[in-house]
Structures are given as C-alpha cells and as structure tokens.
Amino acid sequence: MKAPRIFLVAGEASGDQLGAALMRALRAARPEIVFAGVGGEAMANEGLASLFPLADISVMGLIPVLARLPRLMRRIDEAARAVADWAPDCLVIIDAPDFTHRVARRVRAARPDLPIIDYVSPTVWAWRPGRARAMRDYVDCVLALLPFEPLAHARLGGPRCVYVGHPLVERLNELTTHAPDRDGARSLLVLPGSRLAEVRRMTPIYGETLALLLRERADFDVVIPVAPNMKRALRHELRGWPVTPRLIGQSEKFDAFRKASAALVTSGAATLELALAEVPMAVAYKVSRAESLLRFLIKVDSIVLPNLIVGEKIVPEFLQEAATPRALAQTLRPLLQESAAREAQLAAFERVRARLLEAGRTPSARAAEIVLEYASRCRV
C-alpha cells in the first residue's frame, strides 16, 4: 500500500505544537506516512524539514506585517508552489489564517482535486462571520478545537466542521493531578496577558485592584507566570504595585494553577486553562479607544472561552469602561474564600470539562483519523 503523503503548513508557535502532535498521531496510525511542509522546532523534532524558517512568517500587528509584506508574499507563493510540486494526498493548514488561508486559496486554484483541511477554526462565530461561507471555496473540512464551532459553521454556511477537541484535553493531568489543599496559604494568580500592549494596558488596573484587596486582607501571595520575552517589560510595569509578586516561568505555570485560590486574568486562552484547573477567576479586557469603536462588529455576548463553551456567563467579565479596580476587587474578594460565588464557578467548570471531552478520543488522534480519511479519497 502506498504511503500517505501529507503536506502541513503551520504559521506560528501554537500551530507548530498542534502540528507536532498531529504528526505523532498520524505516524501512530500509519507508520509509513511521509511529511513535508512548513513548521517550527516541534514539528522538526517529529521529522519535518521545513520549507523555510517559521520565524519568517510568525509576525503579528499591522506595522510588523507591513514591514515584512514582500517576504510574506514570497513565502505564500513558495509554499503554494511546493504543495503543487510535491503532490501530496492532503494539505493541512494549521491556524494563522492570514498566512495559511492564502496558501490554501492558491493551492485550490492549482490543484482543485486536493483535499484541504483547516486545523483550528478562525473565530468566524465572533468576528467577520462571512469568512465561514468564503472558506467553502478552498477548505474541505475544519477541525475545531471548541465544541460550539461546528454549529457556528453550519449556521454561517461554512465548510464541514468536526469538533476534535482542544489540545488542553491532552494535558488535563498536568492541570489537575495532586492539587494541594487550597484552604491553607492562599495564592492569587495574576495573568496580565501574553502581548506587550495587553501587559501595559492591564497591569496598572490590576495593581490598583490589589491595593483595594490588601486594605481588607493580606493573607495571600501574588504569583504571575511570565514568558522570558515579557519579563523585562513586566518588571517595568510592576514598579508601582503595592505588593511584590512572585514571577515564575512557563514551566512552573500549571503547578501554580493547581495551587491557586483564585485568578485575575486578561481574557484569552488562559481562561480555559484556569477553568480546567478549577481556579475561580475574574476576567478583564481593554483595548485602545480606536479599537473599541469596532465593538459593534463583535457577534458574541461574551469573549471568555469558558462562557462560550457552556453558553452562559459563568465567569464574570469586565470589558472596557467596566474593567475598574473596584469592580474587580469586589468580584475577587469572595473567590479567595469559601463562598457561593466560588462554588458556583467550580460547579460550572465541571460542565466546561464535560463539553471539552465530548469528542471522545484525544484531539490529535481524532484529527489524524479525519486527515487520513481525506487523504484516502485523493488516492482512490
């Protein structure tokens, strides 16, 4: 039997991790499988010789994108040509839609018979919903990380969409196993964000929130997980805080989650990690005044992933003008002790976990099954 040939295109670090897990699952199912494509260090460790360095296309923000636009366009052309030349049985594009979808469109024009799978749905359910219908022209199947996304694509006229599961499902033991007694010394996690603009915007608000909390009680430690590239900027922003937090590396993050009593967090992927680790939280988010004018384009009632997953506002969120130190402190006080608010969040987190586990198998195994299904169609 001919070995399946799979071309993968990741566009950033998170996609590289997803791609590596998918490669492992594909090889477990078909040891003779052959890979080509674009990826980073994680995919290289699984045997992928990347067409070009991932750093060439891992760029965010309008100004950086414009500065690298000629190179980005060359890399799009290069990747699309490589797909056509290598003649794979399936193309898998992984997240980073600004890059990967442009590759997919060009491949579809050159090879209309080649199955194209999009691993990670764009947020069509929240922003620019017309993208879902447009994707039908160049994507055969979307592998969704969130359980509500298949219904969203069906409602919006998008391509076939299958919930395979969130990658955090494969790390549940790291988030929950051997959690210590949280009734002892209390720890408040603060996660100001993963981007510099978020850190600069949210850290002063969080400092004032802590000042209000400390007026009433001082029996909690403050812990902040921080990526190496953000440590210097974060230390600068922390100079005016009323307490000196303990900064920890990313390798210590999940251990800190297991020990935490509550969290103050900027909206993002961390809210889902906290929900699975059963850490009650208050969520905040602010954007610039110019960006806030686009709020009318947002099509969802919540921007917090656990809320979206269960379809209810189980986690309090404070956006823009509502993200005040007073409101955040009032929400956090009962979460740092036994309270009805704390118990309500903990109960709701069980529902979040149950929904994420609906796919049944591990996300990478389910994704591999679908990729091989489409690859076999091309080879018939």
Image (cartoon, rainbow, N blue to C red):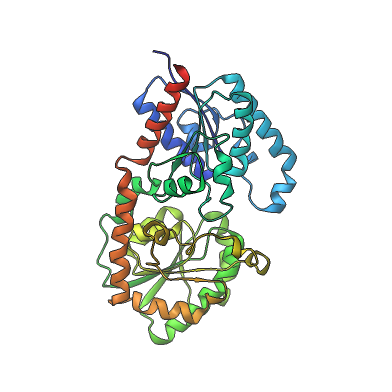
Locate residue 347, reporting x and y percent.
Answer: 28, 65
Viewer-nearest residue: 247 or 162: 162
Q: Position of residue 217 (x, y in %)?
A: 38, 83
In front of the other: 158 or 331: 158
Q: Residue at x 59, y 38 (%)?
A: 101
Q: How many marks?
A: 0
The quadrant in which the C terminus is found is top left
Above or below, 311 relative to 217? above
Q: Nearer the viewer, residue 176 or 320?
A: 320
Horizontal arrangement in the rendering, residue 333 relative to residue 212 (left or right): left
Depicted 113 relative to depicted 236: above or below: above
Residue 261 position by quadrant: bottom left
**Hey, which quadrant is residue 350 in on the image?**
bottom left
Identify whether 3 is placed above or below 132: above
Position of residue 49 measured from the top left corner of the image (x, y, whole percent): 54, 27
Q: Percent position (x, y) of residue 87?
A: 55, 19
Q: Single out the residue that lies furthest toward the top.
A: 1
* Residue 11 seen from this side: no
Seen at 32% across and 61% down, the residue is: 349
Outermost residue toward the bottom?
A: 215
* Quarter of the image that includes the N terminus: top left
Q: Does 224 sit left or right of 354 as displayed?
A: right
At a point 69% along the width and 47% down the height, the residue shown is: 65
The answer to whether any part of residue 60 appears in the image is: yes
